[in-house]
Image: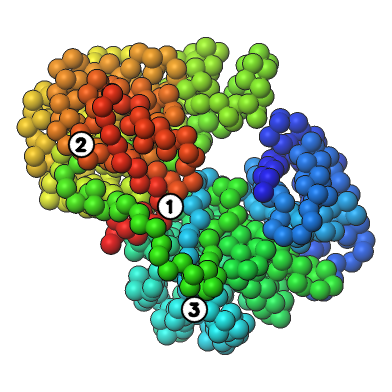
Amino acid sequence: MERIELRISREGEVVQVADASGAARQLSWSISHLLELARALAGCGGPVPPALLERGGSLLEELLGVPAGARLLACAGAWRGGPPAALLWLALEDPRLHEVPWEALASARAPGGSLGASAAVSVARAAPTRGPVSPRALAGSLHVLPVIPDAALESQVTDELLELVEAGALELAPAISRERAGGVDRFLASLRGAPAPNVLHYAGTGSSRGKPRIQLAEFHGRPAWIELEQVAAALVATRLRASLRLVVLDTRERAIASDFAAQAAETLSEHGVDATIAYLWRVEPEHADALTRALYRALCVPEGDCAGDVAASLGRARAALSGHAAAAFAPVVYLRAPQPALFELSSARARDQDASPRPRAQPQRVLSRPCSLILGDRGVTPARGYQRVVERLIHALNQDEVARAELGGTLGMQKAPLSTLAQRYVLRFGTESLRRLLATVAYEASAQASPVPLLIDAVAVALRPGLHVSMHWLPDLERALALHNPDRDIISILPGRAGGELAPQVAVRRAGASGWVHDDARRTVDDIVGAGADAFIVLRALGGAGLVSGTAPSRTLLSEDDFARGPRWPDDWEVALRGLLATRPALFLGVAALSWEHRRALRWLFGERPAAAGSVAILSDETGECERDAWRQHAGGLAEGAHVEVVARHEAELVDALAG
C-alpha cells in the first residue's frame, strides 16, 4: 500500500494544502466557506443534495491539484480489486480544519466517487500525537469491550454484532453498562477489572467543554461525566493498553461539539492509543447501527479485503450506507502513524493447520538473571519528542534554499539521519539555537505528562538493581524504575552541563521519597559503583532533560560533530562505567546496529570489549534482514568475538511476555 500525506494549514481565512515534496497551493475556499460546507453536510438527514455534492467536488479537485493528488489518482486507476492501493493521510494543522468532513468530498475524478467511501484508496487523519503503530497479531477473534451506559442503547449496539459473535470473528466482553458505569469511581473500577480488549467501543454522548469527556450513567439522579484523560490514564495503569489498538467513540445520541473528535483523538493518542474513530456530528440511530455493523464486519473477518485495516474498514462502512447519506461521513478515523493495519487476523482454518508453531526465544528468560539494559531510541522504543525535533529541524531547513537543495527537499530530509539534520541546522543557525530548540521540545514533552511508554514500563518491572543505560532524552526509564521500586534508591547520571565542566550531573530519588534531588553525597564514580548492588543506576548516555527542577541543561549529543566528539566523560568515570557493563549480560532494546549514532554510542559504552556472554538484542518483528544480520553475525558492531542472541517480536507480544 502506498502512503500519501497531505498537509492542510491555514493562516487567518487562507487555507493551503501541501504534500511531502514541498509543493503547495492555496485553496480558493476560505476557512469560513469550509465550515459552512461542514454545517450544511451535518444538517442533511438523508442523501447529500446535488448542489452540495457539486460544491464539494470543486473543493476536491483543488485538493488533489498538488503532485500527491496525481499519485493518489494513479494508484486508484491501477487498482483491480482487493485491499486498498493507497492510504491518504491528512495532517490537519489547525483545530478548525478538523471540523471539515474532507472524507465526504466527491467528484467524477475521485476514486469511487466519494473520497472516504472508496474501495481503491482509504483515508485517515493524522493524530496530533504521532508514534509507532505495531499491529496486534490475533490467534483468535477480535476482542471488543463495550462501554454503553444506556441500557436501551446497549441492546441496540450489541444486537448488531451478534452475527459476528456467532461466526467466531468477534468476541464481546460483558458491557460496562448502566449498573457498572454509575459514577466515575464505579466506572473506573469496572474498567480496571475488565478483560484486556483489542477495541474499546463507547456508545453515548460526548462533550468538549475545555477537555473532551463522555457521559456515564446517572449517579444520585444526575448525569455523571468523565474526562477522556482519566479513561486513558486508567487504560495505561491497568496495562489494558498492551492489547488495545482502537477506541471507537460512537457519540450518536445528541448533537456534539464540533471539536470533540479532534480533542478526543489528541488525548487518546497521547496515551498510546493507535487509532480513534469519532463522530463529527450526530446521526440517526439507524445510520449509526448500519455503520457499526459494517465497520466490524469489514474489520474482523479474516478472509475480507479490509481485515485488520481500520481505515479501509471505515471506508467500506461508509459505502454500505446507500443513497450517499451524509451520515456516512460523520465518523472519521485518526491514526498515530500512517499504518492503518491494526490487527493481523488468522482464519480458523489457518489456526487449525498451524499445529506446530515455530519456537521463539522468550524475552523474560533474559530478565530472569541480572543484566544491564541498553535502551535505544529506535524501533520498539522510539524516544518521545524524537519526531517533533525532526519536524522542527525540517521546517527550519526548508527556509534555507541551499540546505533544501542539498538535502533533496522535504522528502530527502525525512530520509536523512537526525544527526545530519542537526548538523546542517548548527552550521546554519548555530549551536545555541539547536540547544534552545531541543530544550523547548523536551519541555513540551514533559509538560504533556504523558505516561511512560508501555514497553519501557514492562521492562522496568523486571529489571534488577545495577547499571542501566538509556539513550532517551527524557527520563522515562528513571520514572518507570522509581514507580515500581519505591523502596530503592534510583540514581540518574547525565553528562556535564552544556559548554561547562565535565563533571556529570547526578540526581537521586531516595528510597521511600517521592521527589528527586541533586545527589551531592555521591560525587565520585567510586560512590556510584559502590551503590550498584542495591540501587538502580541509569546512565543517560546521550544527555537530555534532568529530573531536578531548575537543573542546567546537560550536554546533549545530537549533531554529527557531537557524535564525533563523544560524550566526554571524565577518564575515571569512563573506565569505571565500562567495567560495570562488562560484568553482566546486556539487554539491547531499541538499539539499531545500522545507525551510525548508535554504533558510536556502543563504542563509548563498551570500548574494545565485547558484550558479556548471554547478551540479547530485542528487535521489532518488522525489522529488516540487514539489521537482524548485523546483530546475528557482527553483534551490532561491537568488538570482535562478541555474540548477541536476537529476539524479534511485536511490541504487544513483548509486553505480554514480560508481564507474564
Asked if residue 616 is positioned above or below residue 530 in the image, the reply reads below
Judge from the rendering whether residue 617 lies leftward or rightward of residue 245; answer left or right: left
Quadrant housing the C terminus: bottom left
Q: CA distance from mark 3 to mark 2?
A: 46 Å
User: Which amino acid, by three-letter code, is at mark 1?
Assistant: His
Q: Residue at x 59, y 68 (%)?
A: 302
Name the residue that disc number 1 marks. 650
Q: Nearer the viewer, mark 3 or mark 1?
A: 1
Name the residue that disc number 3 marks. 172
Asked if residue 571 is positioned above or below residue 412 in the image, the reply reads above
Residue 307 position, x and y percent, is 61, 64
Q: Pointers 1 and 2 in contact (CB under 8 A)?
A: no
Query: Which comes before the other along the chain, label 3 or label 1?
Result: 3
Q: Say how many tags the image has.
A: 3
Residue 563 position, x and y percent, is 38, 18
Judge from the rendering whether residue 531 lies leftward or rightward of residue 492; answer left or right: left
Q: Residue at x 22, y 24 (%)?
A: 609
User: Which amino acid, by three-letter code, is at mark 2?
Assistant: Ala
Asked if residue 144 is positioned above or below residue 338 in the image, the reply reads below
Residue 613 badge: 2
Q: Residue at x 89, y 66 (%)?
A: 49
Q: Nearer the viewer, residue 372 or 267?
A: 372
Q: CA distance from mark 3 to mark 1?
A: 24 Å
Rendering quarter of residue 571 = top left
Label 1, secondary structure: give it: loop
Judge from the rendering whether residue 242 lies leftward or rightward of residue 146; answer left or right: left
Q: CA distance from mark 1 to mark 2?
A: 25 Å
Residue 548 visible? The answer is no
Label 2, secondary structure: give it: loop
